[in-house]
Amino acid sequence: MKDVFKEIKEKFYFTGNIKEDSQKLLKAYGKCSVAEHSIGVAKEARIIAKQYVGNCNEAEIAGLLHDISGIYENKERLLLAEKLQLNIVEEEKVLPLILHQKISRVMAEDLFQIKNKKILSAIECHTTLKKNASKMDMVLFIADKIKWDQKGIPPYLEKVQSELKISLEKGALCYIEEAIKNVQVIHPWLKEAYEDLKVK
Ligand SMILES: [Fe+2]
Ligand SMILES: [Fe+2]
């Protein structure tokens, strides 16, 4: 167990029920909207996985845990990532919010005992995707965008859903095309995923 998570381990009893434990942890830190968003993403990931991957349970687990690092405030993220010895890129220093995907992966592994590499990979790149993304990576990436964590309907929703009917790749590419028009900081993984999917 990593020292940084010692306090959580001391405060919480992990039953082994991922849904219960993750919801309990987020709510204990007052992150009820993240808890609600995670349930929505898990359900959506199940639906997309049923169509494209087959293993709905893995997709659901990835959805439940993808934003588990939401218990940490944005200002804590950079220091936490350093303590966890994560590979931090320049764009993440400018926008530490993006680090939450990598921190969630470590928490899933360390606190929730997730060893499944497909689940861990999907959690780690759920915000930015990455080059050579797996089907599971794309399932979680798209589910997170369809069930976004903001109010109202995502402006890209209709387009992404219609492209998703054709393929996971098209759904992911459609979202990235919309996103890069609006983001201030383009993470290298997002750029690489974009170049990769364009060719595919
Ligand atoms: Fe996220
Ligand atoms: Fe999310």
Image (spheres, rainbow, N blue to C red):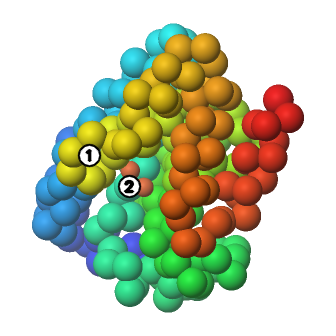
Q: Which numbered disc, 2 or 1, marks the residue that appears first in the sequence?
A: 1
Q: Secondary structure at mark 1?
A: helix
Q: Which residue is mark 1?
A: 37
From the top left corner, tell me how far across and down residue 58 is, in percent.
Answer: 48, 29
Point 57% across, 84% down: residue: 94
Q: Would residue 19 be visible to someone looking at this image?
A: no
Q: Is residue 170 left or right of residue 21?
A: right
Give the CA separation, mark 2 to mark 1. Answer: 9 Å
Q: Amino acid at mark 1?
A: His
- For the residue marked with disc 2, what is the amino acid? Asp
Q: Which residue is mark 2?
A: 67
Q: Position of residue 60 (x, y in %)?
A: 39, 30
Say which residue appears at 21% left-offset and 45% top-offset: 152
Ligand 2 neighbours mark 1 (CB distance < 8 Å): yes
- The image quadrant of residue 38 is top left
Quadrant of residue 41 within the rendered picture: top left
View extreme (right): residue: 199
Q: What is the number of the mark on residue 50?
A: none
